[in-house]
Image (cartoon, rainbow, N blue to C red):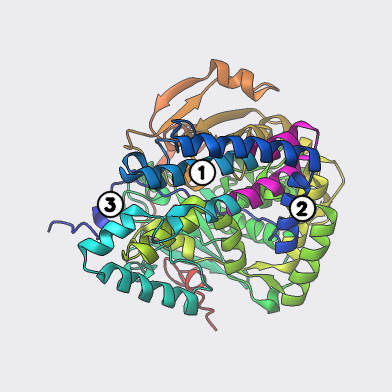
Amino acid sequence: MTAQPDSPDARPVDAVPSLEGGEVVAVPSARGVAGGLVAALARPRLLAHETVRLSQDLVSIAKGTDDHIPADKDKRFADPAWRVNPAYRRIGQTYSAWGSSLGRMVDRYEAEGADWRDVERARFALNALVSGMAPTNTLLGNPAAVKKAFDTGGFSLLRGARQMAGDLLHNRGMPTQTDSSAYEVGRNLGVTKGSVVYRDDVIELIQYAPRTAEVRERPLVVVPPPIGRFYFLDLQPGRSFVEYAVDQGLTVFMISWRNPTRKQADWNLDTYAERVRRAIGVAREITGSPDVNTLGFCAGGIIQTTLLNHLAATGDTSVHSAAYAVTLLDFDGRAPIAAFSGRRMIDTARRVSRTRGVISARSMGATFSWMRPDDLVFNYLVNQWLMGEAPPAFDILAWNADGTNLPAALHEQFLEIFRDNALVRPGEMTVLGTPVDLGSIDVPTFVTGALTDHLTPWSGTYRTTQLLSGPSTFVLSSSGHIQSLVNPPGNPKAAYWTGGAPGPDPADWRATAEKKSGSWWESWAPWTIERSGDLVPAPASPGSDVHTVLEASPGSYVVDRVPV
């Protein structure tokens, strides 16, 4: 059967939207955002200088200058009318000149020595403001939408009005990103065959069925982030990290976190690290292996690290090696996820989270969206509200819309890590009764970063190779945060860099690194296989006499079902 153009199966494998997620962030207040921008712009001398310069630019635009043309790569201005129609041409130039003027003021604010957190807050607000003021967000200011309205006899406007009304009523005024009805967890998402072999009040543990006649002795335990559901690692067949790992002959165990409610407000790092410890114990018992390899994704890597620290301190050797995917441990450098972690903002976030018990998935998702407003807010506003198009059906967008809450206690601890850089200060924080000292962790590690990652900059993830004591391998992936993770081999546009032993300077490492076509999965797999022991016959059935099968994957917690 031929896939229809609007069907999920018709989309190219390499098409992954620009998304941010999988990390914990401080949810900014409107006051905090506005304050950041005001601090950058409310400087009389600079404001007067830019006002004069902008006025001169506007006069030049009125006279027909070729300056201030929106960039060719800016999709918002792709319609030919922005080049050939005198009115639209000048509107686009005026918008570009105005945005550039505000951008220069924030650049000057940074150059004059402002704290990077203040600069990031100002840029966050500036991006939202400039994106929101784009003429393309209005009907008359969008020639493509005007043309479509004429071509459809006005039906595109009716469809857009219905979509807008629905979003105002049911989506808190945010444009819908995807047609979630096209996907269902267990039907066409999270479908790699497996079984739930352990469950407690916080996690389910899934053991995936082998797809090879022989498997490696040492199992892999995957630690996904506590914000977001695990199945972004098990999307549709051909786009599933789990499927790829199982095909390499690895026995894969996946943690599935329960979505907390107000009743679980006190869940903290102790709670989550202890569940990873239990998952490791279950994987060892089922496979008979004395130890495991682990792989932490995004904020899951922070939880993984606190457990590794505890194991090192207690002489527990149940983890043989550990891998990290776009995880940031050192927050001394510039990282947008920590931009709203000032003391006053954390105190505000603490009060809010304690009152509500959780930071809601909707609040966290909105913050991620406003970090990239052109791609994740106004792109959908234009397509759905102005053009009258149906929301796209895309698996990763469906996952992105299916968020989870974050318990107040865990959120508070993450914010303190951001503010105080507590993980890299020996003894600054304690998890599982053990003071955290990253230098005590000496297992081999495989660390990945993403070249255009806006949440966890790759130079920051690289720091993990220097913070831990064991031998480390670093691989740099192309693309952004989530794009680098949903990255199956076979995408001709994907690339990654490998190099020698990581030294102190990430720029030095990259200068000598070798660029390769493909996915970082293809570098991680042999590294992990080398540390996974001999081949043995694949198990005939999942679980064991001690840990029997409870239900088929993807389990209950991922769909917010809590079995009695």
Q: Position of residue 216 (x, y in %)?
A: 44, 42
Q: Is residue 186 found left or right of 404 in the rendered image?
A: left
Q: Is residue 246 found left or right of 133 in the rendered image?
A: left
The amino acid on which the numbered mark 2 sits, given as a three-letter code, is Ser
* Secondary structure of residue under mark 1: helix
Residue labelled with disc 1: 94
Tag 2 and tag 3, C-beta contact below 8 Å: no
* Residue that sits furthest to the top in the current view: 512
Residue at horizontal 60%, vertical 20%? 509
- Residue range (magenta): 103-128
Towards the viewer: 556 or 88: 88
Q: Is residue 530 above or below residue 140?
A: above
Neighbour tally class for label 1: few under 14, some 14-19, many 20 plus, Cα within 10 Å: many
Towards the viewer: 155 or 553: 155
Towards the viewer: 64 or 337: 64
Residue labelled with disc 2: 341
How many discs appear? Answer: 3
Tag 1 and tag 2, C-beta contact below 8 Å: no
* Residue that sits furthest to the right in the current view: 427
